[in-house]
Amino acid sequence: MLVPMSHQSYSDAILRPESPEARILFPAPQDQFERFLFRQRPSEKVGPNTDQITLQGQDHANPQQDALVRLPGLRLSPSRVIVLQRWIGRVESVRRDRFVAVTTDATNPGNPPEESEFDLAEVSEGDRALVARGAVFYWCIGYHDSVGGQRERTSSLRFVRSPQLSEATLDRILEQADRMATFLQESD
Amino acid sequence: MQTPEAEGASIVMIGSFNPAIFQPRWLGAQQLIRAEEAENAKITIIQAQVADFSTEWFQLQVLQQRFTVFTTDPRQYGPLRDLAVGMFAILAHTPVSLVGINRHFHFTTPSVDVWHKIGHRLAPKEPWHEIITGPGLRSLLMEGRRDETSQGILRIKIEPSLKIKHGIYVEVNEEFRAPTDGPSEGAQWVPSCLAMQWDPFMAFAENAGRRILPLGNV
Amino acid sequence: MTDTPPDASQLEISVFGPGTGECVLVHIGDGDWIVVDSCIDRRTRRPVALDYLTSLKVDVASRVKLVVATHWHDDHIQGLADILFAAENAKFVNSAAYDFQQLLRLVALSNRVASPASATREYDRIAEVLDHRRRAGLKRETVGPMAALANRKILSLTQGDRSVGAEIIALSPSDAAYYLAKEELAAAFSAVKGGRRPVTQGPNQLSIVLWLKVGVLDVLLGADLEHTSEPTRGWLAITRSNERPTGRAGFFKVPHHGSQNADCTECWTELLSPDPIAVLTPHAPSRLPTPTDVKRICVRSSSAYSTSDHTSYGLPRRDNAVERTMRGMATNRRALAGQMGHVRLRCDAVSVDPRPVVQLSAGARQLHV
């Protein structure tokens, strides 16, 4: 028998940042709670948007006057997306207004890979510069139920973005690889 | 798997972070998100102790010892992973000691009887009748591993849903610690950990959800 | 097709391929096997090599002697790390043309960025398995990586205490191909740095061609090696080598899916018996083999087989809403793989009359002019 949860436990509401036991499980209670995070002096400026609280300076807390600042918890979207099918695609070639890609079925990996042509117009403008041979994208088809309950079929392409690594980071990665290669290639 | 009424995924890290870095503008400049997403992000707060903002598809919240990136759009699970990978490939020096991947679902059940059957199957009430009156399952947490070779610790939590009447909430979490051998300095281990573990974890979490609801059919 | 293992003195060559990817298993006598490349059976999501050897009740941990990656591309090594992990006594062999350090650098970089290619993920896991074994105290000479280079012997099992002797020699890559590998890896590196997956370009002159002598029989496994008029590379570097094994192979794994680019007449006239048995794996993305390729191969061999028919792959059927939406987004769709096909040859390796028996299963078929 399940017991309806009529109230939330606040035992984890106060986050102790320095605690080594800071729980990694998310969300700790299911519903998002507001967390009491840190102390703010009442005289500190509060922005025009009551959700935006900016602190001027990092003065130490005055125990006589401190108030706890409440930060909004993690916010759930009011609409709902149901994914019916997912693929991962890799661009094989790009023409003027189309590109050819090989898609791998991520929903049913038992299905064979497929080759398809896509219209470049289906790609979000912010992603167009990423469309090149070897580029990877996610393709999802499903339904979107709006807040008002309106259902629409959706199909979205999103191209994978990779970080632009600094030379120092690159060097570090390569150094580690070199150490592994040296070790594996050493004869005894 | 039965379609959940609501679901989401998140990546949580424990370490030592500088929240002020994590701004939409920075993500846009690093090309980790679209320029339009960076420009239209909704900022709650960006400050030395805490950063919190959201875009159309994810929310990012960074405290000095905890990083969370979260989405409730199942189309964006892959991009969420990529975003975390990208950030910590760049911020490789950031000390990160734990990475947790989380997935949660809210399912409906066909009837209150099925709802109760699930609870009774997971936590039989007979042993409790002599201890308390009207025992009921409030929360169940199981811990184990995904399989024999998994490096992470896996936890599954099941509770009555707070969102759906007579619904079931399932939360699956897998936690990875910084390796003691090999590259562990800072966050260097994080991108490959996420790259290798994300897909198997997500498939596992879906499968776990698929196997819990039929318990109410017995 | 029976699931009894071959006899101790039998040669078995099993070629698998679903239309993208291939795997060759060879029984080299006395219960010992080698694995050349790997592909995944989509139904079981396991390497087909492990599924098949398990069905024969082969103790993979002790009986697989070599795991060979003829080259590092996606469609040749999927699942190879799992095989290497299971084959505890096997040595890993890769192409000497690819500088191992550069390959690991590519792998390391690829796995730090989003959505790494399956080949680099696979190689990362291969390196992990090797690293684990080396740290456990095993020597490089035992676990690998062994760099296969033209005319280098990579395995020798003498007949003394066996039913049949077995010798495996790499015939490629040649020295002259090294600079091609450097260029290829540099291009791949550049792609990965730019956030893209490496895409193979240009002719393949770097993969490992293997010559196997099992008992009295010779076998030529052509991998993906392509032909060039340059005599120091490709097939001519093999046919014109003074150091290559003598003998004529009666079984030929046709290179590069039977393509014209990989066809070398000298290979047929100098390395193969007059009427060899030929097997190929198709490659649906490139629509190989073409009808012309099939005709050319059939004419030169006593019998020719393909693991799959790439012209007949059907598209899977999905939910109506998905199908309707797909039709609006993606055009000219075609499936790039079908059922995993298996061509199996068994014959007596110690007799002058080996009487080969070829069996086909699932999508495999005999080729005809």
Image (tube, rainbow, N blue to C red):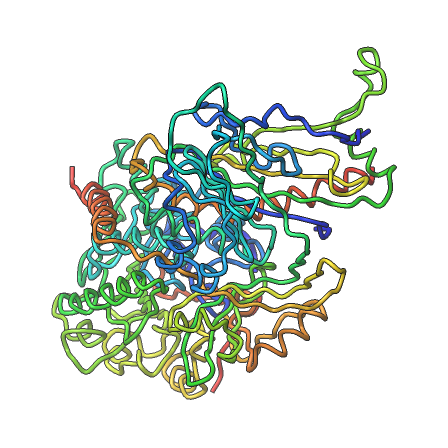
- Total numbered badges shown on the rendered structure: 0
Residue farthest toward the front in the current orientation of the protein: A43
Q: Quadrant of residue A160?
A: bottom left
- Residue B147: % across, % down: 53, 37
Residue farthest toward the left in the current orientation of the protein: C242
Image quarter hosting the C terminus of chain B: top right
Return the residue nearer the eye: C159 or C360.
Answer: C360
- Residue B65: % across, % down: 42, 32
- Residue A165: % across, % down: 28, 54
Q: Quick check: A43 above or below C331?
A: above
Q: Quadrant of residue B97?
A: top left
Q: Residue at (27%, 56%) from the top-left corner? A: C106
Return the residue nearer the eye: C62 or A58.
Answer: A58
Return the residue nearer the eye: C246 or C231.
Answer: C231
Q: Quick check: C306 above or below C70?
A: below
- Residue C192: % across, % down: 32, 61
Q: Residue at (45%, 75%) from the top-left corner? A: C285
Left or right of residue A37, residue B163 in this image:
right
Q: Quick check: A82 above or below A119?
A: above
Left or right of residue B153, residue A2 in this image:
right
Q: Is residue A11 visible?
A: yes
